[in-house]
Amino acid sequence: MAKTIVGISTALGVGAISIIRLSGPDAIKIVDQVFVGNKLKNQPTHTIHYGFICLDQEKIDEVLVSIMRAPKTYTKEDVVEINCHGGIATTNKVLETLLNQGATLAEPGEFTKRAFLNGRIDLIEAEGVMNLIRSETELNRQVALNQLKGSVSEKINEIRNKIKKIIANIAVNIDYPEYDDVPIVENQKLKKEIKQLKKELEQVYEESKHGKIVQEGIETVIIGKPNVGKSSLLNALIEENKAIVTEIAGTTRDIVEGKLNLGGVLLNIIDTAGIRNTKNKIEKIGVEKSLSLIEKGELILFVVAQDQKITSGELEILKKIKDKNHIVVINKKDLVSKIEKETLKEYNYIEISTFDHESVIVLKEKIKEIFNLAKIKQQDLTYLTSARSISLLKQCLKIIKEIEEGIQQNQPPDVLELDLKRLWQELGLITGQVFEEEIIEQIFADFCLGK
């Protein structure tokens, strides 16, 4: 990391201020070469200086320059931030000038990657930085902030330390059996400790399912026959005329998407084409897409009409959604019912009218109940949120199950020690205390430029 990197840390466009950030051993020297004002190399750390960025006597912009010397910076390297006037031409010209002085253009997430590699933050905290930037709801923000503060890492590290202690005790038993004051590690004692570890890991895993919901939202798919009110339901949920609504069957031929903030959790709602047999080539593609989305959806809102009998085709869809989170939405509740409710006794169903605001509120409350959103808000919000970390946690639970089986088979502690080391290693991958270069590159590539 000998090179000095530079990147634009604010959104590029028209605005009052743009911030250009440099990090690395030559950050102060590079800016000093083009800054007309106080000589930056002589200034104390964490100070701001007024002046101009100039090139060959030409003033490029009037700026404020902040200098922050290592190690008390975001990257633990020398950092300089230039506050220039917002605007694409000005910002790019200042950036170009710094690149010409020897700075290297930062890759996406490279500043945060340096903070990680220099030991200022771990991987969970790094993911928290990105989650904080992308937060769309207050709940998003709170969860991301807990990651950034290290609350989640602390929980994982506590478990790792317990495993480390067990491994150390086993090692002492093997290497120094003659010492009387060393506690003997027997399978019975190990069984009790592993049971407790498993309980703690399961708790983190269950809570992290909530974290994924908070961070990524709930993929919600509205399906049903044409003209049962799917598009009207989307519009009613998001309180916006997003989807075209007509009395003509097959109006929606492709997916229409909208978002709903439901108690701090986003519902990513997809209104699909009406499912029916059709010879229209375009509509047929839409129907096929609708059916494929049933598999991917985390919540299925299956809309049927109160004044129509449930068809054999609808019964087939009911079978598909039975084991998924679902609500059968019986729309047009003000009309005479032709639906045999007995057919729906094994399903979550609710009667509404998309034009009745109160019944739409009842539907929203039903969704909250299915995903236990009230409980999520009441908890301490110390969650893992990324698919990467949750996948590693599942692997940890698999390993701990293997250790339990080994204890039952009466395997000696020194054999079980290998699996315990594997478990300790796997948890280290979550926080980044153990890491593979390829995975690190992939994680930070998803970050925005300048962060």
Image (spheres, rainbow, N blue to C red):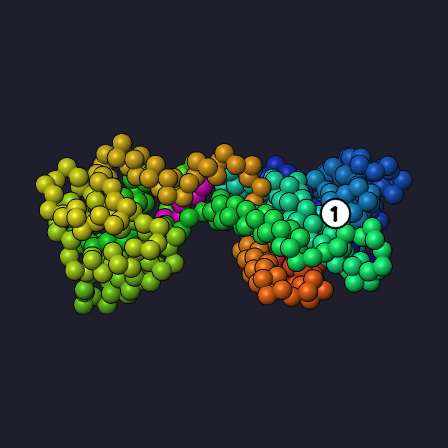
Q: What range is drawn magenta here?
A: 265-270
Q: Which residue is mark 1?
A: 120
Q: Amino acid at mark 1?
A: Arg
Q: Nearest the camera: 40 or 356?
A: 356
In this rendering, would 408 be left or right of 82? left
In percent of width and height, residue 232 lies at: 25, 44
**Could you say which is closer to the camera, residue 58 or residue 347?**
347
Residue 366 visible in the picture:
yes
Name the quarter where the N terminus is drawn.
bottom right
* Residue 77: % across, % down: 80, 48
**Residue at image location 35% in from the left, 42% down from the top:** 367
**Toward the viewer: 254 or 92?**
254
Classify 10 Å Cα crowding around label 1: few (below 14), some (14-19), many (20 and above): some
From this viewpoint, is residue 91 visible?
Answer: no
232 drawn magenta? no
Image quarter of residue 441: bottom right
Residue at image point 38% right, 58% down: 296
Q: Is residue 405 placed above or below 219 in the rendered structure?
A: below
From the viewer's perspective, is 362 left or right of 311?
A: right
Q: Residue 297 sits in which quadrant?
A: bottom left
Q: Residue at x 85, y 59 (%)?
A: 178
Residue at the top extreme of this rendering? 358
Q: Position of residue 61 (x, y in %)?
A: 71, 42
Q: Secondary structure at mark 1?
A: loop
